[in-house]
């Protein structure tokens, strides 16, 4: 089986309308089919981000499998591991944020009843995405765990979020351009090239702090 269609969405009037052109070009380069869903601005970043679950649920209604990609992502190499035949017996394939959450920015949703259950349940949780500490990744992971969905873990190179484009593990396959909203690293201001956004509040886990102190 070939790599299935790629699904993404952008908010009208947002910078993502420009950013998605990189994803479009990379899909064209590697011969991948891209569907871009354009949605109206719902009044805030969190409200717009919550629509990811709705877009994925609706895409599942049209047919599985499919790959969801954030609009600020692009392919730097052919994503051969997004072929569904490589993940027989699983419901989805994705990278993880450490050992906790599934990263929602690059996910292969496979053609299973459990996948449909997860996406419908995730969409019902969409309003919760706006709550502090309960974003789209946490809500997706919650439903995956609750419903017992099986996740095939992709290499970290399939969700590389370093602004300089260098993968932490192996060659870059999917690069996410997070410049403009990534949390600031006090020792490296490149994460906020235009300054920290007004009203931004940075949070850290204890594990993150311990890793920083050991480095």
Image (cartoon, rainbow, N blue to C red):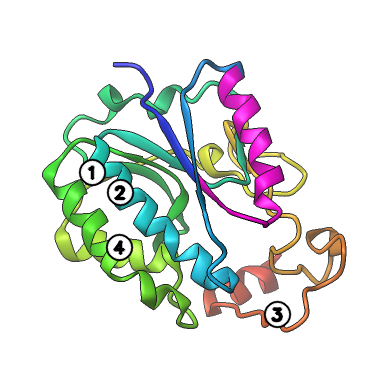
* Residue 11 belongs to magenta span: yes
Q: Earlier in the sequence, mark 4 or mark 2?
A: 2
**SS state under label 1:** helix
Q: Residue beneath label 3, please? A: 200
Residue range highlighted in magenta: 9-28
Going by the image, does 52 lie left or right of 30?
left
Where is residue 215, by image quadrant? bottom right
- How far from the left and from the top, in percent, is residue 122? 29, 63
Residue lying at the far left of the rendered structure: 113
User: Would residue 214 be found to the left or right of residue 87 on screen?
Assistant: right
Residue beneath label 1, please?
A: 61
Badge 2 vs badge 1, beta-carbon distance below 8 Å: yes
How far apart are the two marked residues, 4 and 3, measured between alpha carbons?
Answer: 26 Å
Are the residues flagged by discs 3 and 2 in contact, CB closer than 8 Å?
no
Q: Quadrant of residue 62?
A: top left
Q: Are marks 3 and 1 in contact (CB under 8 Å)?
A: no
Q: Dot 1: within a 10 Å radius of its alpha carbon, few (fewer than 14), some, or many (20 or more) residues?
A: few
* Separation of residues labelled 3 and 2 (CA atoms): 32 Å
- Give the number of the mark in front: 3 or 1: 1
How far across and how far down the image is residue 65, in percent? 28, 33
Nearer to us: label 4 or label 2: 2
Which residue lies under the disc numbered 2?
Answer: 58
The mark lying in front, picked from 4 and 3, is 4
Of callouts 3 and 2, which one flags the residue occurring earlier in the amino acid sequence? 2
Label annotation for residue 123: 4
Camera-nearest residue between 75 and 56? 56
- For marks 4 and 3 on the same chain, the one whose residue lies earlier in the sequence: 4
């Amino acid at each position: 089986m070939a790599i299935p269609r790629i699904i993404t969405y952008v908010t009208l009037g947002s910078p993502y309308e420009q950013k998605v052109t990189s994803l479009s070009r990379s899909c064209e380069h590697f011969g991948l089919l891209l569907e871009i869903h354009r949605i109206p601005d719902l009044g805030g970043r969190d409200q717009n981000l919550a629509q990811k679950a709705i877009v994925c649920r609706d895409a599942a209604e049209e047919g599985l499998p499919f790959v969801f990609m954030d609009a600020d992502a692009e392919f730097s190499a052919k994503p051969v591991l997004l072929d569904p035949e490589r993940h027989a017996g699983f419901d989805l394939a994705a990278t993880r944020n450490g050992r906790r959450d599934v990263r929602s920015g690059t996910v292969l949703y496979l053609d299973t009843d459990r996948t449909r259950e997860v996406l419908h349940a995730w969409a019902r949780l969409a309003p919760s995405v706006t709550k502090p500490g309960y974003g789209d990744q946490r809500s997706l992971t919650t439903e995956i765990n609750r419903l017992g969905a099986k996740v095939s873990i992709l290499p970290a190179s399939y969700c590389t979020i370093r602004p300089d484009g260098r993968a932490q593990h192996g060659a870059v396959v999917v690069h996410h351009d997070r410049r403009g909203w990534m949390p600031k690293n006090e020792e490296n201001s490149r994460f906020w090239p235009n300054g920290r956004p007004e009203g931004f509040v940075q949070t850290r886990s204890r594990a993150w702090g311990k890793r920083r102190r050991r480095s």
